[in-house]
Image (cartoon, rainbow, N blue to C red):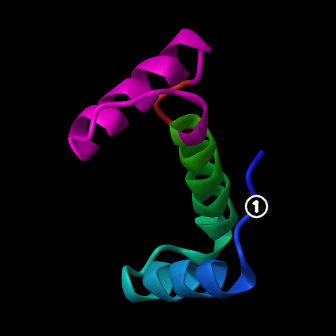
Amino acid sequence: MLSLSPDILKQFDITLVKKEVPFAIRADYRKWLLYYLDFRAKYSLPDSRPEQVRLFVAKLKEKDQTSKQ
């Protein structure tokens, strides 16, 4: 799995605070960010970001991930 620089993670954490994401679930957001970036690195995807997200969600469903996850 990919790793992010501490600077990027710090910026991501600042964004989570600004968006008022509860502290208790911020680690989950970081985890899913890494999963998404890993997905993008592994597969040839279209340039459209909405389409990339749609394909990521479809892949998660293939792996029996629940919508809550």
User: Horizontally, is 60 left or right of 46 in the view?
Assistant: right
Query: x, y percentage for residue 26?
Result: 61, 69
Q: Residue at x 47, y 74 (%)?
A: 21
Name which residue type carries label 1: Ser
Is residue 22 part of the magenta span, yes or no? no
Q: Which quadrant does the N terminus fall into? A: top right
User: Horizontally, is 14 left or right of 55 in the view?
Assistant: right
Query: x, y percentage for residue 44?
Result: 45, 27
* Secondary structure type for disc 1: loop
Q: Quadrant of residue 41?
A: top right
Residue under label 1, please give it: 3
- Bounds of the magenta span? 41-65
Magenta part, dominant SS: helix
Is residue 50 part of the magenta span, yes or no? yes
Q: Is residue 37 above or below residue 19?
A: above
Q: Residue at x 54, y 86 (%)?
A: 11
Q: Residue at x 54, y 25 (%)?
A: 66
Residue nearest the viewer, comparing 43 with 9: 43
User: Horizontally, is 16 left or right of 63 in the view?
Assistant: left
Query: x, y percentage for residue 17?
Result: 48, 86
Residue nearest the viewer, comparing 25 with 40: 40
